[in-house]
Image (cartoon, rainbow, N blue to C red):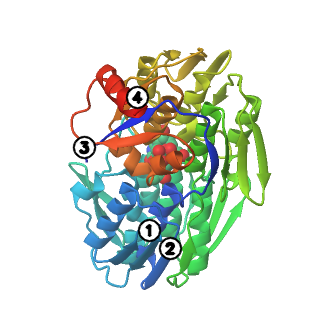
Amino acid sequence: MITNEHMLIEQSEKLSGEVSVFGAKNAVLVTMASTILASGKFIFYNVPASTDVLYMISLLESLGAHIIFNRIENILYINSSSITLWRVCPEIMKKMRASILVMGPLLARFGKAEIALPGGCVIGARPIDYHIKNFEKMGAIIGNEHNYLKVSSNRLQPQTIVLEYPSVGATENIMMAATSVKGTTKIINAALEPEVLDLVKVLKKMGAIIEVQAPGIIIIQGGKYLSPIEHEIVPDRLEAGALLLAAAITGGSVTIKNARAHDMDVFLLKLEQMGHTIQLGQNGITLHACQDPKAVSFKTAPYPGFPTDLQAPMMAAQCLAQGKAVIEETVFENRLVHVRELQKMGAQIEVYHTKAIITGVDELYGASVIASDIRASCALALVGLAAKGITIMTGIHHWRRGYELLETKLNHLGANIQVAYGKPMPVIQKTNRLAKELER
Ligand code: EPZ
């Protein structure tokens, strides 16, 4: 959904104050898909009103679900009793990657599914071969007609599944399907991200028997009757990371009241290595920024390694840090697209395939930049908070997909981010005009 909505981000004073985060996008989407596994009324709390959640609502409604979303209180009511369809129209499938996550639940409920391949995106091809070959190993028959999949299985079989890569989506899809398969299904080299573990919690609350073993094994005793539940979605470590980095990049102090430090240990370690002070307590996570942060290097990896979804936002913080940072993206093959936009703002970054070398500079300056994906939009907004003048960001439908009104939270902490519509004017004019307005 491309809109002419754009964001104006003014150089910010030090951010300070307290905020909370919503439930994680990458937990709520799969949890919504899991409601297909049982019939009845589900209630979910702390659900962000982000575009992807609205997309998943429309997907489930297209299958027959009755859904009410109280967006004021962020409570989502899903009645899955009326789901009778197993075919997802291509237009809905293409809106987001997470739509592939209804494949396992539909197979479990109906023994069949008809879905289009989800779109890839700028960060990589994002194939679904791990999903397909392992469902086939469990006995599914999958026909592919022009990227439209017709999946069927008389009876899925319990299997020992070895994932060649700890894929989040493949782990979640297989695990949800396996809850309906009598016998023991084992997933080896499973993803254990906090959002995957929140899904394990949801499925166990529904009645599934699931065991998680180190170093990455999930064992499902399938065939149990599953019932609808109520659940509060795990706090979003990615929103928390964005807010902590906003404090860091503006030299401020911010507390994230409901963030879970254990979900972001490596990220917090890297912030401390930069010189920032991290305090953990009953009241969540507090960052007190140091005024001369040092650049730190890191490599993204599956949990508990440095999360790929915080790579771009963390790169933003390196642009103004002292020294050089080497950042290597190992999860997606093309997740450095935001570098070009950061360079427009004066960042000194060289890219060698999936490695970026950032040399910290003393100042950055506002520019007109384009967000290429959800986490790139976060990185550009963060640099906009520190850059001199005004940054105009377009492509903020990505921002809307991943966050509910994150700009409102940043403004609550002292930022000045405005959302405008219509053709964005070149920064120089906007700067002069806005500067005059701001002086009044
Ligand atoms: C989930 O995507 C998240 N999305 C992503 O968040 C996140 O970056 C990613 O996990 C990694 O943590 C949701 O949960 C909705 P993967 P997913 O399967 O499941 C390759 C965000 O910004 N792969 O773990 O699609 C794949 O191409 C988004 O919130 C295959 O090759 O990620 C990638 O290189 C971005 N074949 C790697 O594995 C497959 O069948 C990891 O992908 C599946 C994946």
Along the polypeptide, which appears first: circle 1 or circle 4?
A: 1
Residue 145 in view here: yes
Q: How far is the residue under mark 4 from the one under mark 2?
A: 36 Å
Along the polypeptide, which appears first: circle 2 or circle 1?
A: 1
To which residue does mark 2 refer?
44
Contact? badges 2 and 1 (CB < 8 Å): yes
Residue type pointed to by label 2: Phe
To which residue does mark 4 refer?
391
Residue type pointed to by label 4: Thr
Residue type pointed to by label 1: Met
Q: How far is the residue under mark 3 from the one under mark 4?
A: 19 Å
Left or right of 323 in this view: 8: left
- Frontmost residue, 288 versus 85: 288
To which residue does mark 3 refer?
2
* Crowd band around label 1 with a 10 angstrom C-alpha radius: few (<14), some (14–19), many (20+): many
Provide the secondary structure element on which disc 1 rests: helix
Tell me the residue at 38%/72% (across/down). Answer: 69
Along the polypeptide, which appears first: circle 4 or circle 2?
A: 2
